[in-house]
């Protein structure tokens, strides 16, 4: 988590560009060969290359249609069939343009996918999109849980807003730990029962 403190000249003067924020956030997992999933605010081709080459991390994210690196054929929807996909491959980066419905296109870029695999279902979704949909939910779930069980109160004081946010995330972290311990303790109990027989 990184707190946005605005522009300042003090010791917390950092670049707030999306790519710099991502690089600071992934520093603790550098060279762990994990995959980073991000939305179109953060995804850019230079960032994907930096994460792969300098940080030892792969990445998958949606793209905005106005990126200069995207060829116009990837954003055009006029002559494209619904559920059609268009792939672009370059070195260690793959781009897909998928038409989920008429006059709409979804763009994704990945450094973990290197082929044009598609689902065999009716929608013929590319594997990249299915992986993104399967793993993007972390932020959405946290937002939903914070909204449902929030401790926050209306205030104009930013330290209190920050405090409430930390309490909300701490509550979710505690829930995850308790849930994981129940699953693990259930498995341990099952193993003990088997050992006793």
Image (cartoon, grey):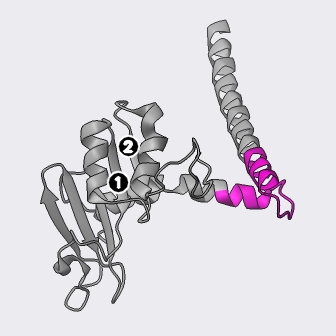
**Which residue is denoted by mark 2 in the rendering?**
35
Foreground pick, 136 / 40: 40
Q: Which residues are magenta?
A: 143-168
Instruction: Find the residue positioned furthest to the front.
Output: 9
Name the residue rendered at 71%, 30% in the picture.
Answer: 182
Mark 2 is surrounded, within 10 Å at the Cα level, by few (under 14), some (14 to 19) or many (20 or more) other residues, namely some
Q: Position of residue 71 (x, y in %)?
A: 17, 75
Helix, strand or loop status at disc 2: strand
Q: CA distance from mark 2 to mark 1?
A: 7 Å
Name the residue rendered at 73%, 41% in the picture.
Answer: 170
| Horizontal relation, residue 70 to residue 1: left or right | left
Give the mark count. Answer: 2
Foreground pick, 94 / 187: 94
Above or below: residue 38 compared with residue 33: below
**Which residue is denoted by mark 1 in the rendering?**
60
Q: Is the C-beta separation of discs 2 and 1 under 8 Å?
A: yes
Mark 1 is surrounded, within 10 Å at the Cα level, by few (under 14), some (14 to 19) or many (20 or more) other residues, namely many
Query: What main secondary structure does the magenta stretch of the protein show?
Result: helix
Name the residue rendered at 13%, 56% in the picture.
Answer: 90
Q: Position of residue 192 (x, y in %)?
A: 66, 12
Above or below: residue 26 compared with residue 46: above
User: Looking at the figure, which quarter contains the N terminus?
Assistant: top right
- Name which of mark 2 and mark 1 comes first in the sequence: 2
User: Looking at the figure, which quarter contains the C terminus?
Assistant: top right
Helix, strand or loop status at disc 1: strand
Q: Position of residue 189 (x, y in %)?
A: 69, 19
Q: Position of residue 51 (x, y in %)?
A: 31, 44
Is 154 included in the stretch rendered in magenta?
Answer: yes
| Horizontal relation, residue 142 to residue 129: left or right | right
Q: Is residue 112 visible?
A: no
Name the residue rendered at 60%, 58% in the picture.
Answer: 6
């Amino acid at each position: 988590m990184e707190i946005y403190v605005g522009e300042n000249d003090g010791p917390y003067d950092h670049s707030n560009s999306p790519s710099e924020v991502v690089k600071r956030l992934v520093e603790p997992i550098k060279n762990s060969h994990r995959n980073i999933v991000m939305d179109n605010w953060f995804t850019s081709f230079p960032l994907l290359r930096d994460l792969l080459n300098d940080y030892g991390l792969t990445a998958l994210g949606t793209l905005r249609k106005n990126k200069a690196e995207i060829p116009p054929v990837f954003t055009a929807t006029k002559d494209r069939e619904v559920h059609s996909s268009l792939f672009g491959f370059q070195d260690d980066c793959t781009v897909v343009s998928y038409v989920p419905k008429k006059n709409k296109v979804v763009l994704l870029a990945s450094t973990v996918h290197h082929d044009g695999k598609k689902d065999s279902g009716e929608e013929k979704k590319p594997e990249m999109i299915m992986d993104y949909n399967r793993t993007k939910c972390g932020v959405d779930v946290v937002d939903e849980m914070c909204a449902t069980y929030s401790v926050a109160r209306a205030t104009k004081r930013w330290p209190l807003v920050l405090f409430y946010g930390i309490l909300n995330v701490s509550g979710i972290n505690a829930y995850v730990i308790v849930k994981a311990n129940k699953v693990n303790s259930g498995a341990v109990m099952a193993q003990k029962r088997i050992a006793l027989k």
